[in-house]
Amino acid sequence: MRGSVAWIRFAVVAGFVLGLEIACRAGWINARTMIAPSEMALSLAGIMADGEIYASLSMTVLTILGAYAISVTLGTVLGLLIHRYDVLRRATAPILAAWYAIPSFAFYPLFIVLLGFGRPALVALGVKLAIVSMIAATIDGLDKERRVFDKVARIAQLGALARIRLITLPAALPHLMTGLKLAFVYSFIGVVAGEFILSTAGLGYEIAYAYDNYDTTRMYGLILLTCVIAALINSCFRFYERRLPGGGVR
Amino acid sequence: MTSVAALRPKVVAASVHAELLGVSKTFPGSGGQGPVTALDGLDISLRKGEFFSVVGPSGCGKSTLLDLLAGLSAPSQGRARFEGQDISGTVPPGIGVVFQEDASFPWLTVSDNIAFTLRRTGTDPAEIQRRVDYAIGFMGLRGFEKAYPAQLSGGMRQRVCIGRTLVMQPRFILMDEPFGALDQQTRLLMGDELLRLWRETGATVFFITHALDEANLLSDRIGVMSARPGRIIDTIETGWPRERDSRLAERGEFGQLTARLWSLLREESRIALGMTK
Ligand SMILES: Nc1ncnc2c1ncn2[C@@H]1O[C@H](COP(=O)(O)OP(=O)(O)O)[C@@H](O)[C@H]1O
Ligand SMILES: [Mg+2]
């Protein structure tokens, strides 16, 4: 079953890439609009071989990790508090529900004004996008701990810490995993898109720079690089998710 | 106290193991609902080593009664005692509970679920292994040691929870409709196993069921509860020998006793369902 799903997924992607390749080669798509996938790959290989990109790349990765770390820790703590205190839950529910309806990038100029023009503003943008998914996942995971588990813990004479370690955390883990994954995706989008819009360095900036200079080949090479990074990290998450005890099934 | 076999020699009054005295339990209202009085002025006294069942219409407060006896919740009025100590709202050691709902941990295998509580006691690992293995055989879970609850049927998950409780060898075992998810044959066989274990360990058993024949088969005494607010309206002494199993059902007295239970419960069940006379 899983095998056939993987095949279908592969076939969809391969078909799309092949179609694009043909469309570009045949000249149906203007070469200034989009280049063939094979040329993108070649361009990416050139960029990587050249090595000049690594400084931008590591800066972007560090910024993403910064935004991610803040989103995960702060998101977990806020999730715990909101779960614990009903007043907080009722106060924050409408804000959390409406959060993603607010265009996050509209906040970017504000972050620049507050934090200056540089990495901190990008981190803030990443956090703005990512933190709510972590908060929501934490609340969700804790809500899923069933009332009967509390009784089992008391019969087993578990102390507060043992209970958190042995019951609360494992019960919440699949939900926390979802939060960890989403928070990463959002941190990534926030930082790279922020760099694209306005910055002086980073992967997003490099893409914007190539774009502004009509260097379509380089731009698509960099976009492909972005996709590859995102896909790699996503498969890491999927790998660990599948290995959760109980098969991640709840 | 009434008994079908009134002429049999009376059991010597044994010492009291757990009891509720004049207990009421009212849950505060929430979400537009008024407060609910689940139990009102209830007395119950379990003798050490007896098998005591409770039957009653659904919603009459059986699970609430179990929580009070186990120290999982405190009575609104009255007292809960276990082994001579007041326990209102604190779970004393030596108690094992099988809950009505599935309480198996989805992230642990069958073996690890069964060993969960035992591992917290500092028991020697070899002894844990021995007891868990015994429980797996006993509960018919052989071959599923490494399976996760999501891969099991509801009845099997419930047996995992029973196993987790029994390996602790509690002095007082409370079970809330533990065989509810099992088919009739498995239910009877599990009952036999439970009786055997009860005899071997000398534990006191408090057993909630809605199946009258099951209560009849397993118990030394059966408490019959009224519709909510729950009280014990009668306690029936079955008079069965300690050495017994599901073949009891062949006896003539067995049918009479089940019929008697039903006559006591019929009116309460109609009230619980809101039927008029
Ligand atoms: N935690 C609770 N909060 C509010 N009401 C409760 C709670 N637990 C039980 N009740 C109410 O108390 C009554 C008895 O419940 P319960 O003891 O579960 O009955 P039974 O086990 O006999 O079916 C029911 O009306 C139920 O709705
Ligand atoms: Mg119940």
Image (tube, rainbow, N blue to C red):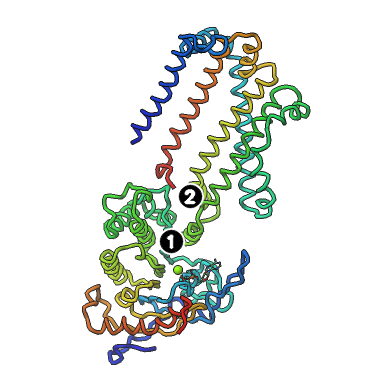
**Residue B3 horizontal side relative to residue A100, left or right:** left
Residue B236 image-quadrant placement: bottom left
Residue under the image location 27 percent in, 77 percent down:
B242
**Residue A235 at what x, y percent from top left?**
46, 29
Would you name the residue on which mark 2 appears? A166
**Residue A1 at what x, y percent from top left?**
33, 36
Q: Are marks 2 and 1 in contact (CB under 8 Å)?
A: no
Would you name the residue on which mark 1 appears? B101
**Residue A36 at what x, y percent from top left?**
48, 12
Residues indicated by labels 2 and 1 sit on the same polypeptide chain: no
Q: Which mark is residue B69?
A: none
Q: Residue furthest bottom?
A: B7
Q: Eyeballing the image, is A143 above or below A206?
A: below
Which three-letter amino acid code belongs to the residue tagged 1?
Answer: Glu
Residue under the image location 38 percent in, 75 percent down:
B53
Depth check, front residue: B203 or A237:
A237
Which three-letter amino acid code belongs to the residue tagged 2?
Answer: Leu
Is the distance from the Cβ of mark 1 to the nearest ligand 2 atom less than 8 Å? no
